[in-house]
Image: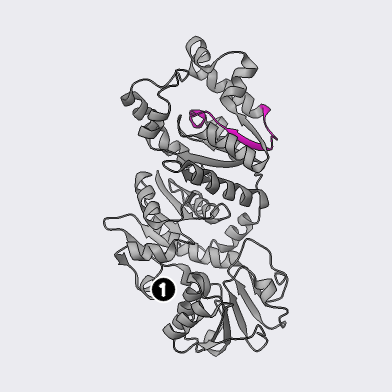
Amino acid sequence: MNKYAVFGSPIAHSKSPQIHNYLFEQLGINSYYTRIISDNSIHAIDLAKKLNLSGFNATMPLKKALFAEINSVDEISKKAEAVNTVLIDNPLRGFNTDIYGIINSLKGIDLGSKRIAVLGAGAAAETALIALAESNSKNIGLYNRTENNKQKLLEKYSDLSSISTNDFSDFDIIISTIPDLDSTINEIKDEQIILNADYIYQSKFSNCKNYISGLHWLINQALPAFELFSNQKLTKDFSVDIMSMLEKSHNTNTIYLIGFMGSGKSKLGLELSKKLDTEFIDLDLFIESKESMKISYIFEKYGEDYFRNLELRYLKELDGFTGIIACGGGIITNPYSCQIIKNNGFRIYIYSKSTDCFERTKQDNSRPLRKDFDGFEKLYNSRIDKYFANSDLIVDNSSDFDKTINDIEKEIKIIYEK
């Protein structure tokens, strides 16, 4: 199995995994794509290598920083000084497919004859400027609330004009890369086209005749990234099918924490439940309470297969639970249990190095599968791909516990808002 992910912070809102996993499934490619929390480019590259990824995407705040870390990049990345797609070769290779999100979302429009306003002055706005230049657009204005970042782009792109008012009525096309579009523009004309990069929150303009949502931008940048990952050219247009798939909702009332023994699931789950004022269940303790037996005794007397069936039964019993469940380390070895947690909630894989997991469990004699380190590491290595393939989000719990808590708390709040 080849492994891919999108890095960023926040990242739980990203729909990139749905797009890539849909395409992997449709084309019969044995690969899986997930989300990983990271706000540091060096950490992202290091973790990608530890998890043995074949490639990854990056969103804010990593695109500019990754460009500085990767020596081999394509021409668009050089122009944007930003990378959103990385192939893990030797050396790493960086690409920027964001311009296709813009160009293909505005396909069929003669951009050279239009007056275009770009809202924002960050990485996405600069990508829009490059995409418009590639499309021979000549009449472009730039708007941003703060003058400093806008001035940098005005100096870099001499053909740009500065927009100092929020009256955009004279523009044919508005490309928004800002989070506060609705408070920036009061109204638009029927003939005006709006391309909004933000696909998380629904704009008041979303029902307008010529409104293009950020999902189009997302899909159109994801497709060339997928071609880079899979090393094959898509011969079918999957855009409509993907858009339909993305509009379907998924239950996220239950947050499942998965990971190897000693990764920190129980400790993190308990602390998160306090911070989020929600219910928490440690599944192993729940089973022990229901069965009036310790897990170690169940393993010793009845064996692991018996315990996995118990685990499955109590997972089913907890169907409809709202809150956080810390799962046992071996839950991903039962495909039926995997299907339940996939269907019933949002799965967060707590990643920790094998040495850290072993050290954290050295005083715990209740774990039936923890013996010598060689056996421990062999079990760890046999499961790591299964954790990855059963995750919706990965968090690295290798160092700062408080930061890990804060990162997950922020992401869960996003999940509950969806």
Foreground pick, 22 / 196? 196
Foreground pick, 355 / 338? 355
Report the residue that reaches farthest toward the top. Answer: 301
From this view, report whether residue 172 is shown above or below residue 357. below
Q: Residue 390: in sight, yes or no?
A: no
In magenta, the rendered stretch is 317-334
Colour scheme in use:
one colour
Q: Quadrant of residue 291?
A: top right
Tell how many labels.
1
Name the residue: 63% across, 25% down: 314
Name the residue: 44% across, 85% down: 155
Q: Residue tagged by mark 1? A: 80
Name the residue: 52% across, 66% down: 220
Image coordinates for residue 89, horizontal then vertical, percent: 30, 55
Foreground pick, 282 / 271? 271
Q: Quadrant of residue 310?
A: top right
From this view, report whether residue 119 is shown above or below residue 244. below
Is 259 left or right of 15, judged from the image as shown? Answer: left
For disc 1, the neighbor class at 10 Å (few under 14, some 14 to 19, many from 20) is: many
324 inside magenta stretch: yes
138 inside magenta stretch: no
Q: Quadrant of residue 342?
A: top right
Element at badge 1?
Answer: helix
Foreground pick, 15 / 147? 147
Image coordinates for residue 208, horizontal then vertical, percent: 72, 74
Name the residue: 49% across, 65% down: 221
From this view, report whether residue 167 is shown above or below residue 237. below
